């Protein structure tokens, strides 16, 4: 058994968690700045020294595995046919695979779209379109366009099965880095995640981490095995479902507020009610959404972008701040750490706004339709009202003096009728920052990972 | 296998006929894409695009069919499937209106075939075969 070392190569920090398998305990955690721009091994070694210092000795690890979101994480473009169908299916698969979906395209790709893909430094393209046996024209057109544009980054085709052969021929003709897998939407409104997600992970591990200079680390550790958000998603799913006799927490929501994005996860069925009619594409049981315009530093400007001038004035008066100046400062100083009550106050406010909005985009809604027979309920998206817990992770939450105030924003505080936000959840904080590490541990030791999460997540 | 999109339009929850239509058309050898009850025009059109369907068969049982179907042809044209066949049937309007007039109004709206109340789906099968060329 011995010791496992679990490493999360984050965009800012490389975080280490050492687990004693015999005692079933986390024995130490440590971190250091990620140094992927120079040599990723430097930051890792420094973090390791810090870890040994904490332990007061060096230990030998029987297994050292990592996940990574360093160097921009995994950036994907999702292409489909109809916005609400294959485009959305493709987007959800990318997000579930731990990617950030920077570009989303419907119908035929244009020259501008192709330029955006080239300019956007996209790592992998997911090309969908057409239910099985359905439309082939769009996927064939788009694959050809990508070929003509000499796009050499990996392209995963996960569209209509009926044109797999044609697409493969196009991949060959243009010498593309093409991969074929199952359709993300084989039938209308049916979401098929697994095949494409595994293909994406495989490409991430074989090609992307190499290209980003992360692979070097494998000279010193066993392997990088997952993109970080996927590790977190797996941890959350385990925590929700439980394992063998160890009970899970049931329906949960998890939020991770970072400098550049706010991620929202929900682990539950789309609905448990029998009196609603569910509309639209299947919802994944373990769902992740990422808001690239909501974050504490790089993406801080996005938080106030949707506010009108009037709303900004009101907000400034109510909170006694100059929100535009604060946001601008944080955007220019992404490594800013709050040091005084004022900074904390502003960070708290920004985090609350991130979470409120990210949840608004993640959560489903219900509409009452009046018919001659009375009311019928139409549901779109996931119903989170029965969530048992809302869990918070990420630096701003951990440092906040009032993490509960931030997490509370996931619930329906503004009482917007129809929003299916958590109604009366408990709140937990990932104080020791272990969720990604537990996702890694769960690959081989799910029971221990589950127990450690239950032990370390702090009730608020 | 040719795809046909079926469903019940608007705020209409009559589900039984919809299942029978699915069963009948599937037995006749079609790829039936059933989007179910309470479906919007957009749901029908989106499904037709992704499945490359040649026919959308709209059911309306509760009497508001005329309101629910208005503008559907125009939306198909916008969505790039302007040539798709549109059928409608069930109890498409309230009460006992003169059906020749009703039919004329739906034809004006761009529907290709309009069926009076009480037309079982088997009766339309011949038309489907003619129109889809089988
Ligand atoms: C069961 C029923 C209900 C149930 C439905 C349960 C369910 N979830 O399915 C409930 C109680 C919910 C209900 C509610 C209402 N109902 Co109701 N209901 C019926 C009833 C008794 C039977 C329907 C049925 O299942 N028939 C059996 C199936 C197999 O037949 P079908 O639905 O007609 O479908 C066949 C054909 O129409 C045809 N077809 C259908 N679509 C198409 C399309 C094409 C292109 C073609 C070729 C053929 C075709 O093929 C189908 C299969 O053979 C009918 C009366 C009747 N006897 O038809 C009234 C009836 C349909 N209801 C009616 C009404 C008014 C209502 C309500 C508005 C109010 C009310 N009084 O209750 C509400 C509306 C609710 C809503 N939002 O939709 C009226 C409609 C009147 C009109 N259009 O002029 C009817 C005709 C009763 C009547 N005579 O007044 N109803």
Image (cartoon, coloured by chain):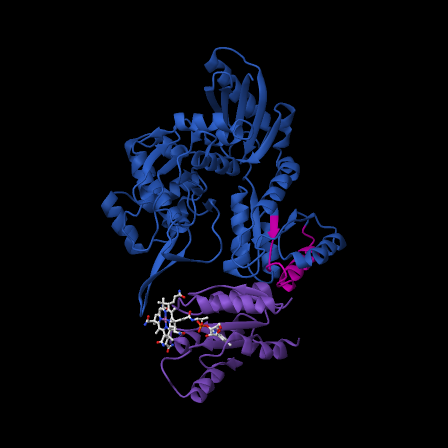
Q: Residue at x 49, y 38 (%)?
A: A233
Q: Is residue A58 above or below residue A19?
A: above
Q: How many marks?
A: 0
Q: Residue A199: percent from the left, percent from the top?
A: 63, 43
Q: Nearer the viewer, residue A253 or A216?
A: A253
Q: Residue furthest top?
A: A57
In the image, residue A235 above or below residue A273: above
- Ligand 1 positioned in quadrant: bottom left
Chain B representation colour: purple
Give, as a single range, the part of the protein colored magenta.
A125-151
Residue at 55% across, 34% down: A68
Question: Is residue A103 at all visible to an observer of this figure?
Answer: no
* Viewer-closest of A320 and A136: A136
Residue A133 part of the magenta-drawn span: yes
Residue A201, x across and y down, in percent: 60, 40
Q: Quadrant of the N terminus of chain B?
A: bottom right
The residue nearer to you, when weighing A200 against A37, is: A200
Does A373 sit above or below residue A190? Answer: below
Quadrant where the C terminus of chain B lies?
bottom right
Quarter of image, res A173: bottom right
Left or right: residue A37 versus residue B95 is: right
**Residue A159 shows up from this direction:** yes
Chain displayed in blue: A
Residue A453 at x, y percent in the picture: 43, 28
């Amino acid at each position: 058994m011995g010791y496992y070392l679990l490493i999360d190569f984050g965009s800012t920090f490389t975080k280490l968690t050492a687990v004693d398998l015999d005692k079933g305990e986390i024995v130490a955690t440590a971190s250091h700045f990620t140094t992927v721009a120079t040599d990723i091994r430097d930051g890792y070694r420094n973090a390791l020294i810090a870890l040994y210092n904490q332990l007061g000795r060096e230990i030998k690890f029987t297994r050292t595995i990592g996940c990574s979101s360093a160097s921009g994480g995994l950036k994907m473009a999702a292409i489909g046919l109809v916005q609400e169908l294959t485009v959305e299916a493709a987007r959800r698969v990318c997000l579930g695979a731990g990617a950030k979906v920077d570009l989303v395209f419907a119908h035929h790709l244009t020259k501008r779209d192709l330029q955006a893909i080239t300019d956007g430094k996209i790592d992998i393209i997911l090309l969908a379109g057409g239910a099985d046996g359905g439309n082939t024209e769009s996927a064939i057109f788009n694959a050809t366009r990508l070929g003509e544009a000499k796009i050499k980054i990996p392209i995963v085709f996960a569209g209509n099965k009926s044109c797999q052969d044609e697409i493969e021929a196009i991949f060959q003709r243009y010498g593309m880095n093409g991969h074929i897998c199952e359709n993300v939407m084989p039938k209308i409104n049916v979401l098929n995640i697994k095949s494409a997600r595994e293909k994406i992970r495989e490409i991430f591990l074989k090609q992307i981490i190499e290209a980003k200079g992360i692979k070097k680390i494998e000279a010193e550790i066993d392997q990088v095995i997952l993109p970080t958000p996927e590790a977190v998603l797996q941890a959350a799913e385990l925590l929700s479902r439980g394992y063998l006799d160890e009970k899970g927490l049931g329906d949960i929501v998890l939020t991770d507020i970072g400098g550049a994005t706010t991620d929202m996860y929900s682990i539950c069925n789309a609905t448990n009610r029998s009196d609603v009619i569910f509309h639209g594409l299947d919802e994944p049981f373990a769902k992740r959404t990422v808001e690239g315009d909501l974050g504490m530093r790089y993406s801080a400007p996005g938080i106030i972008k949707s506010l009108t001038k009037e709303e900004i004035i009101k907000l400034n008066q109510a909170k006694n701040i100059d929100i535009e100046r604060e946001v601008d400062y944080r955007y220019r100083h992404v490594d800013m750490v709050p040091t005084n009550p004022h900074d904390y106050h502003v960070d708290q406010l920004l985090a609350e706004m991130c979470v409120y909005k990210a949840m608004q985009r993640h959560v489903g809604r219900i509409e009452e339709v009046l018919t001659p027979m009375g009311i019928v309920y139409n549901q779109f998206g996931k119903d989170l009202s029965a969530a048992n817990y809302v869990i918070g992770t990420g630096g701003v939450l951990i440092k906040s003096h009032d993490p509960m105030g931030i997490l509370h924003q996931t619930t329906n505080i503004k009482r917007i009728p129809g929003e299916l936000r958590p109604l009366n959840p408990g709140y937990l904080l990932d104080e020791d920052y272990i969720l990604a590490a537990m996702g890694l541990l769960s690959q081989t030791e799910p029971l221990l990972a589950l127990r450690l999460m239950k032990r370390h997540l702090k009730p608020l | 296998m040719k795809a046909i999109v079926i469903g019940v339009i608007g705020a209409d929850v009559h589900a039984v006929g919809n299942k029978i239509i699915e069963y009948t058309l599937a037995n006749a050898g079609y790829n039936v894409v059933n989007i179910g009850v309470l479906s919007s025009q957009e749901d029908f059109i989106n499904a037709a695009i992704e499945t490359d369907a040649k026919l959308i068969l709209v059911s309306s049982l509760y009497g508001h069919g005329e309101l629910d179907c208005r503008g559907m042809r125009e939306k198909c044209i916008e969505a790039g499937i302007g040539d798709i066949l549109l059928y409608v049937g069930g109890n498409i309007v309230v009460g006992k209106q003169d059906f020749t007039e009703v039919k004329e109004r739906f034809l004006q709206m761009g529907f290709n075939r309009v069926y009076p109340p009480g037309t079982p789906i088997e009766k339309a099968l011949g038309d489907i075969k003619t129109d889809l060329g089988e």
